Image (cartoon, helix red, strand yellow):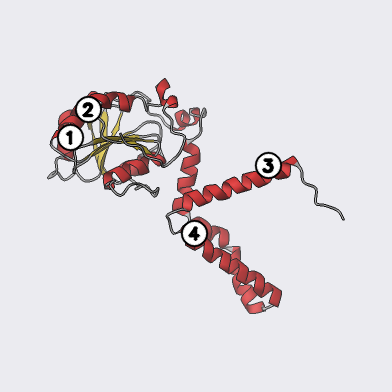
Amino acid sequence: MDFIPFTIIDFIDIVLVASIVFGLYRMSRDTNAPYILTGIVVIYVLWVVVQALNMELLQAILGQVINVGVIAIIILFQPELRHFLQMIGRRQGGFHFINRIFNSRSDNEPALQPIITACAEMSATKTGALIVIAQRSDLSDIIAGGITVDARLSVALLENIFFKNAPLHDGAAIVQNDRVIAAKCILPVTQSPVPKSYGTRHRAAIGITETSDAIVVVVSEETGGISVAFRGRIERNIAPRNLLECISKHFIDNPKAQENEPRKRGKSSSK
């Protein structure tokens, strides 16, 4: 009796396929994707049965469905596929030169003192705020969905944006190169399991950092607590005197950024 040859390449092949399947499971967990996948599997099994029974009419109909299946999957799973590709691109490691080629803006860190001061004052008055500090990732889609501001970063500007009766206080403000580029921006909310105590701002902060290298500062409207999100994790209840250090360590060009890179996505921490 001959056995099927099994080589190290076969082993690597199996491991890679298993890793991809597990990654797809992690990506689609807590979404509607498993139900869609179940429907696809049911249609495929039905097609196999129809072929075996030689039902020509059903075979022709299901055959057409199978033929356009790849396009249908791309359309149905567009958000998940985009999230997956962004996750891969974000973890490009030493290939930051790709971002430098396609991103013309400089990588200078913005002056953080206006953000620190504004957050400390808004924390004291329990004024909710959501500030996104852009780095190398392209946030043009997020910016396009908000209201263009393009003004010099200042304490007064941030406090006016997030004043609870101001028209721009809902949503996030995008800070880039010492300027507030846009306000009232809608951020993607994380699909990862987080504590129920997290509000919409905290979920949005985690969501945008899961698919970009942005740093997000959150001021809670309920408690006045200050939080910083980066790489899908969030550090909560940060004292204003420690906020500068907490933000600075996440800048890509800062050597400490690599040391503080979380090993697990979607996991949050709190002080």
State left or right for residue 206 relative to residue 62. Answer: left
Q: Is residue 244 above or below residue 144?
A: above
Give the Cα distance between marks 2 and 4: 43 Å
Quadrant location of residue 225?
A: top left
- Kind of residue at disc 1: Ser
Give the Cα distance between marks 4 and 1: 41 Å
The residue at which mark 4 appears reads as: 34
State left or right for residue 95 relative to residue 261. Answer: right
Res 96 seen here: yes
Label whose residue precedes the other's in the sequence (4 or 1): 4
x and y percentages locating residue 18 in the rendered image:
61, 48
Label whose residue precedes the other's in the sequence (1 or 2): 1
The residue at which mark 2 appears reads as: 240
Q: Nearer the viewer, residue 42 or 142?
A: 42
Give the Cα distance between marks 3 and 4: 26 Å
The residue at which mark 3 appears reads as: 12
- Kind of residue at disc 3: Ile
Disc marking residue 55 = none
Q: Secondary structure at mark 4?
A: helix
Callout 1 crowding tier (Cα within 10 Å): few <14, some 14–19, many ≥20: many
Label whose residue precedes the other's in the sequence (3 or 2): 3
Label whose residue precedes the other's in the sequence (3 or 4): 3
Residue at the image point whose x is 57% and y is 47% from the top: 20
Residue at the image point whose x is 46% and y is 42% from the top: 86
The residue at which mark 1 appears reads as: 123
Residue at the image point whose x is 39% and y is 39% from the top: 232
Label whose residue precedes the other's in the sequence (2 or 4): 4
Callout 3 crowding tier (Cα within 10 Å): few <14, some 14–19, many ≥20: few
Quick check: marks 4 and 1 in contact, CB under 8 Å? no
